[in-house]
Image (tube, helix red, strand yellow):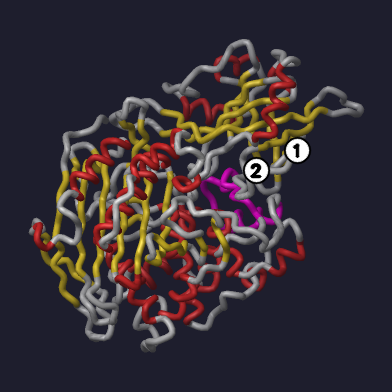
Amino acid sequence: MSFQPRRWTSAWICLSLLLSSALFGVEIDVVSASPLPRALSLLSSDFDAYAETIRNDWGVPGISVSIVKLANTSFDTTPTIETRSYGVAGTDRPVDALTRFGIASNSKLFTAGAIGSLVDAGKLNWTTPVKEILPEFGLLNNYDGGLATIRDLLSHRTGLPRHDYSIPKSGPRDAVVNMVQYLQPSAEFRDIWQYSNVMFIVVSKIVETVAGKPFEDYVTSHIFKHPALNMTYTSYTQDNLYSTGYGIYENKSTFAVPYVVQPVGAGAAGVITNAIDVAKWMSFLIKSLMAAGRAELPAGATPISPSSVGNLAIGRMLESGVPDWPELSPTAYGYGLESVTYQGHHLWTHGGDLPGFGSQITWVPESGVGVAVFCNTNQEPGAAAAEIITYRALEDLLGLPHPNWEARYEGATNGTSGGQVSKRSISRRSFAARVPSHLHSDITSREQNASNPDPAGYIGTYTNGGYGDVTVCPTSDVAYHHNTPSTCQDLYNSLKGGTQTPEQPATDSLNLLIYAPRLWSDYIQLVSHSDALFVGNTYLIAAATHERPWPISLNEGEMLAIFKFDEGAHQGSIVGMEWSGVWGSETQESSGYPEVTFVRAQ
């Protein structure tokens, strides 16, 4: 699919309150939508042109914007909602206010909110030790594992880095809970903030266990469908309103990317919603936070009490001590929520990034405004466009100056920002594997010893308690020469008709594949730099579609694999493998390697 001609729509949403009680004015029924008179718009007259320019410049197929404004923050205030839509959601499908997008890590606040509702019900506390609910949970340090509380998991302070490549593509959440005890920490327990999808999967299992029903069912019935929210279009599943997620070629043409979040990852990144429903969510959050500590509501009047919403918003850990931009403060992290100031205004915000989607949801309680931006592509294009448009909308709503955000983000992505900022501001919720800089010299020193060894010695299954089993395979063109594991054929079938990499590797080095199907990736391609050292690239497979009958491999980053040789009776045989560059530490980089150690299965 290529880009369509410029197209945008603007709608003013007429609202009616349907609550039987006048106490809480959030449940909204959209009874009509009509072109918004410019004189009534909450945004500047040039906002549409600006947003469309950003969409085209960053190559985003479709964008949905949701704006909420409250005249005051009392519970019976009717919010004003304005939506803007740009581009396409699929073939011959323009984006509109009902188009549903995967919101990735913005799902975490719903998961944390589910915990808040259980706290309200007296079924647990924020400081309840995880092992009291899930006895099988643990950390590599048994003592720390016994101390870890729900608060530690929600605020990303367990000492574990991301370990995204450990999350299985499918299966029960129990498997993730069981594997955590084998994952290597990169910091001391409660020492620093390190983002963790793994821990939010554990939290979703806590909700499931305490609530006595599947996690998705509890969040749907208790939050999405609560009378105070009535989020009609929000769920963990796709339907005919769901936007296609896209990857982008260098020439800005696009291709469809499958939705990768299987049920195991629902608590970390699984919510799908639209501009109408997210406005209800932002309105609820604004009213609840402003009421925290002041308003007493009857039990059950809201899905999450103001007190618990207040707990979600309290900054528990310093996420970033150095502001990304001059207008911003350092960032604190609560429970699935960031707290930061922008040009003197206190924002609560979070971003989301997964293959095919980028999002940003931001609300300013003291001013009674909220902004959500959804994009149907991910990483730099989608995440950057969502943040740029969010800033512009906030500036319009709050009457603030307009910094040149597009130039700043272009500088951050191409390295010309003069050291003022880093790509961290764009991709804090996403992760790409990378080779730690101190290992690059190791690669160079070993290249002089590089050879083209027989792949037969490497082929086989390798296992790690936290990362499970992975299979080292020959490339498909030479597989018939070797005793190849059956799982390798599954990988070959997934790649059939496509290319293994965007560029074919050099033929004078040994090339291997590691079949490791995980939530965010499918395989790794290795190129030898010596008999032991291989540089790898991780890939997610965008499966063939009706419109594109061939698969595409999406590069998710670079890593190192080092094979370990037996020095004893079976000298020369490979007994294990070590990985570096995959764990996603929030420290500058790992102080050494390995990050993950695999043992070769016998």
Frontmost residue, 380 versus 221: 380
Could you say whether the residue bearing mark 2 is in a helix, strand or loop?
Answer: loop
Q: Report whether 421 appears left or right of 188.
A: left
Frontmost residue, 325 versus 469: 325
Q: Amino acid at mark 1?
A: Val
Q: Which residue is mark 1?
A: 599
Q: Which residue is mark 2?
A: 589
The x, y position of residue 20, in whole percent, is 22, 84
Rendered position, 349 above or below 163: below
The x, y position of residue 478, in whole percent, is 59, 15
Rendered position, 495 above or below 174: above
Residue drawn at (37%, 65%), measured in percent from left and top?
345
Residue 320, image quadrant: bottom right
Residue 513, image quadrant: top right
Residue 60, image quadrant: top left
Q: Earlier in the sequence, mark 2 or mark 1?
A: 2
The x, y position of residue 429, in whole percent, is 48, 50
Residue span colored magenta: 160-182
The x, y position of residue 281, in whole percent, is 32, 67
Q: Nearer the viewer, mark 2 or mark 1?
A: 2
